[in-house]
């Protein structure tokens, strides 16, 4: 048997990590400023995280959701307190796409309606419903019906109102910051207008914080910069620091019923332990504050940078759009200076490092950038 080759792979194999440092199988050392798509929130192999998982594995690794699991209730209480949504309910699953699938189902159950409003350039996942709400026909198979999805431009409130006024929509789903698209933010006034329109027309407002949540932007969730509250929030990526886990935070106005949702692996003992360890580290090491601080350093350092058309984002969710003559800089950063970064097409470099990233590491990246763009 062989692998189904759906990924373009760098010829690099990391075999060991510590905080923001990676070692490959040849002993080469790299600085990780991408965190495996914003997943590594508290650094590679943090000792507290490793110990908690080891200890839990020595007690019990898994049992199904047919029995009590006090770790789930502990996680719900801790997450609610840390993120400011302590009166919301939590449904646990395995990934961001799965979280969005369940959020859309809950909204449809709650309203009795089928249609969903999403936004141009959105990315919500690759499972059937999530990919239908993703504005990328290349990854939608004929099976992935989009008949109940309507896309409108981001930050166009009149386009939203035109659709919602038809009274057919169960939900509006929007990313806290559009990540895969290249780091595009909904304006604060747009989110406030969206909240008002959802209230007026009986729609559920879903904030997809899969990539933009868990302290990455200097608030626990990106939409909290605007002061808006969502009806449903989805989270994953940084929630488990590499252990697969996703969550759906659901307003108390939306009632559960037995059998509405279900999962085999979601909220298992190891996943909950990983998520609790992440919250411990975020709180004890003040990582939300660190994300804001290092993000401000990067913003100041790259202000009016000659290689950039535009710097976008908040905190440690950063998109840097390159001028045409600097396309290819990501490869040079990786192969010449050993910095892992992400991308959105050829033009945009994305930085999504661990929230533990130090000032010294940030400065070393800026210095390497400047040397390569002289």
Image (tube, grey):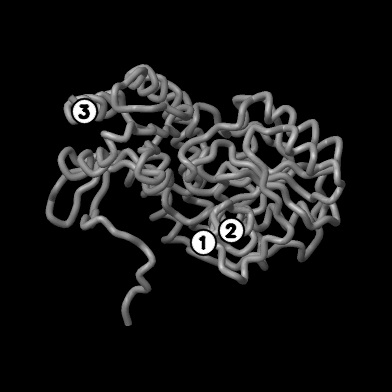
Q: Secondary structure at mark 1?
A: helix
Q: Is residue 25 above or below residue 285?
A: below
> Mark 2 — residue?
131
Q: Is residue 248 above or below residue 339?
A: below
Q: For label 3, count other residues whose C-alpha is less than 10 Å away and answer few (under 14), some (14-19) or many (20+).
A: few
Q: Secondary structure at mark 2?
A: helix
**Residue contact between numbered discs 1 and 2, judged by CB atoms under 8 Å:** yes
Quarter occupied by residue 324: top left
> Is residue 276 visible to us here?
no
> Mark 1 — residue?
139
Which label sits in the foreground, 3 or 2? 3
The residue depicted at 58 percent of the width and 51 percent of the height is 135
Residue 197 locus on image (x, y percent): 80, 34
Q: Nearer the viewer, residue 76 or 92?
A: 92
Q: Secondary structure at mark 3?
A: loop
Closer to the chain start, of discs 1 and 2, is 2
Closer to the chain start, of discs 3 and 2, is 2
Q: Is residue 2 left or right of residue 364?
A: right
The residue depicted at 87 percent of the width and 47 percent of the height is 167
Quarter occupied by residue 67: bottom right
Q: Is residue 178 above or below residue 363?
A: below
Question: How much space separates mark 3 and mark 1, taking CA atoms?
Answer: 35 Å
Question: How much space separates mark 1 and mark 2, taking CA atoms?
Answer: 7 Å
Q: Nearer the viewer, residue 120 or 258?
A: 120
Q: For label 2, count other residues whose C-alpha is less than 10 Å away and answer few (under 14), some (14-19) or many (20+).
A: many
Which label sits in the foreground, 1 or 2? 1
Q: Quadrant of the N terminus?
A: bottom left
> Mark 3 — residue?
373
Residue 75 locus on image (x, y percent): 59, 46
Q: For label 1, count other residues whose C-alpha is less than 10 Å away and answer few (under 14), some (14-19) or many (20+).
A: few
């Amino acid at each position: 048997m062989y692998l189904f080759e759906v990924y373009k792979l760098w010829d690099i194999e990391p075999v060991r990590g510590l905080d923001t440092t990676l070692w490959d199988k040849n002993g080469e050392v790299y600085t990780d400023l991408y965190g495996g798509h914003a997943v590594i929130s508290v650094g590679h192999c943090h000792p507290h995280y490793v110990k908690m998982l080891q200890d839990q594995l020595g007690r019990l690794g898994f049992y199904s959701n047919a029995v009590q699991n006090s770790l789930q209730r502990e996680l719900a209480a801790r997450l609610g307190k840390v993120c400011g949504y302590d009166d919301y309910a939590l449904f646990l699953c395995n990934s961001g796409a799965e979280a969005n699938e369940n959020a859309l189902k809950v909204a449809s159950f709650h309203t009795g309606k089928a249609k969903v409003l999403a936004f141009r350039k959105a990315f919500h996942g690759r499972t059937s419903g999530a990919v239908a709400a993703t504005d990328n026909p290349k990854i939608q198979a004929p099976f992935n019906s989009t008949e109940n999805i309507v896309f409108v431009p981001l930050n166009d409130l009149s386009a939203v109102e035109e659709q919602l006024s038809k009274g057919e929509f169960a939900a509006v789903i929007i990313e806290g910051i559009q990540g895969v698209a290249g780091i595009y933010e909904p304006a604060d006034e747009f989110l406030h207008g969206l909240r008002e329109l959802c209230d007026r027309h009986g729609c559920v407002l879903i904030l997809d914080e899969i990539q933009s949540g868990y302290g990455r932007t200097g608030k626990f969730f990106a939409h909290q910069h605007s002061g808006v509250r969502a009806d449903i929030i989805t989270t994953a990526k940084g929630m488990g620091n590499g252990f697969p886990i996703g969550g759906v935070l659901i307003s108390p106005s939306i009632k559960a019923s037995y059998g509405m949702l279900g999962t085999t692996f979601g909220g298992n003992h190891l996943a909950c332990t990983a998520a609790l360890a992440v919250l411990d580290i975020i709180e004890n090491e003040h990582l939300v504050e660190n994300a804001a601080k290092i993000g401000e350093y990067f913003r100041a350092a790259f202000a009016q940078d000659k290689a950039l058309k535009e710097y976008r984002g908040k905190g440690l969710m950063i998109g840097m759009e390159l001028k045409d003559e600097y396309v290819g800089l990501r490869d040079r950063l990786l192969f010449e200076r050993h910095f892992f970064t992400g991308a959105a097409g050829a033009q945009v470099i994305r930085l999504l490092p661990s929230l533990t990233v130090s000032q010294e590491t940030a400065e070393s990246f800026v210095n390497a950038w400047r040397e390569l763009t002289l």
